[in-house]
């Protein structure tokens, strides 16, 4: 088993790695949420634009205006598809970062468990040593009484 100071060092390093992994996970989640918000804005804008298009269409629309509306809607649809790909990438990063954080946390917990076991072994040895000293002291006291 590693020495207590080596375990302490491993625990400290694992804790730092876990903290860094948690920060990366937090950033990935924020980026994913931001991408989702942008998609919602694009979808809302497309809906608003389509409503405006319907209103304008009922009032009468020239062929060139119709093409312009249609062209802009096509561009919005491309932007929406692109944003959906951004979201998929962001969610993939969240999944990877969550896995990295979980791995780091598992490692840190393993080291903590080793340290706890080492401490229990140390305490048991100390308890046995103290008991042995107490027994020897009692035996000497008994021997000296006789």
Image (cartoon, grey):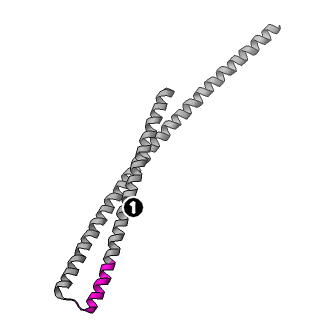
Q: Nearer the viewer, residue 100 or 69?
A: 69
**Which of the 4 image quadrants contains residue 126?**
top right
Q: Is residue 142 left or right of residue 42?
A: right
Write the start and end of the magenta stretch as one range: 47-61
Q: Residue furthest bottom?
A: 59
Name the one closer to the observer, 132 or 79: 79
Report which quarter residue 122 is drawn in.
Answer: top right
In percent of width and height, residue 137 lies at: 73, 14
Residue 2 in sight from this viewpoint: no
Residue 143 vs 43, above or below: the answer is above
Question: Left or right: where does residue 22 sit relative to residue 93?
Answer: right
Tell me residue 85's x, y (percent): 29, 63
Task: Give the residue at mark 1.
Answer: 33
**Tag 1's secondary structure?**
helix
Q: Residue at x 78, y 9 (%)?
A: 143
Number of on-image labels: 1
Q: Is residue 36 above or below residue 55?
A: above
Relative to residue 88, is residue 112 depicted above or below? above
Task: Choose top left, top right, bottom left or bottom right for residue 107.
Answer: top left
Q: Main secondary structure of the magenta part?
A: helix
Is 34 included in the stretch rendered in magenta?
no
* Residue 83 % position (x, y): 30, 65
What residue lies at 26% left-to-right and 89% top-to-bottom?
Answer: 57
Q: Is residue 27 left or right of residue 122?
A: left
- Residue at 75% from the left image edge and 13% from the top image edge: 139
Question: Taking the image as drawn, is residue 11 in sight?
Answer: yes
- Residue occupying image coordinates x 34% and y 54%: 93
> Between 85 and 23, which is closer to the camera in this rendering?
23
86 to 127, vertically: above or below: below
Image location (x, y in percent) of residue 15: 46, 40
């Amino acid at each position: 088993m590693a020495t207590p100071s080596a375990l302490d060092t491993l625990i400290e390093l694992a804790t730092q790695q876990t903290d860094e992994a948690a920060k990366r996970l937090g950033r990935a989640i924020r980026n994913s949420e931001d991408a989702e918000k942008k998609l919602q804005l694009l979808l809302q804008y497309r809906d608003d634009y389509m409503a405006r298009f319907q209103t304008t269409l009922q009032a009468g629309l020239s062929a060139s205006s119709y093409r312009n509306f249609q062209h802009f809607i096509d561009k919005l649809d491309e932007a929406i598809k692109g944003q959906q790909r951004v979201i998929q990438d962001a969610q993939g990063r969240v999944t990877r970062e969550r896995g990295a954080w979980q791995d780091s946390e598992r490692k840190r917990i393993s080291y903590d468990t080793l340290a706890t076991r080492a401490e229990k072994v140390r305490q048991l040895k100390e308890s046995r040593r103290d008991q042995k000293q107490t027994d020897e002291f009692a035996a000497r006291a008994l021997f000296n009484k006789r």
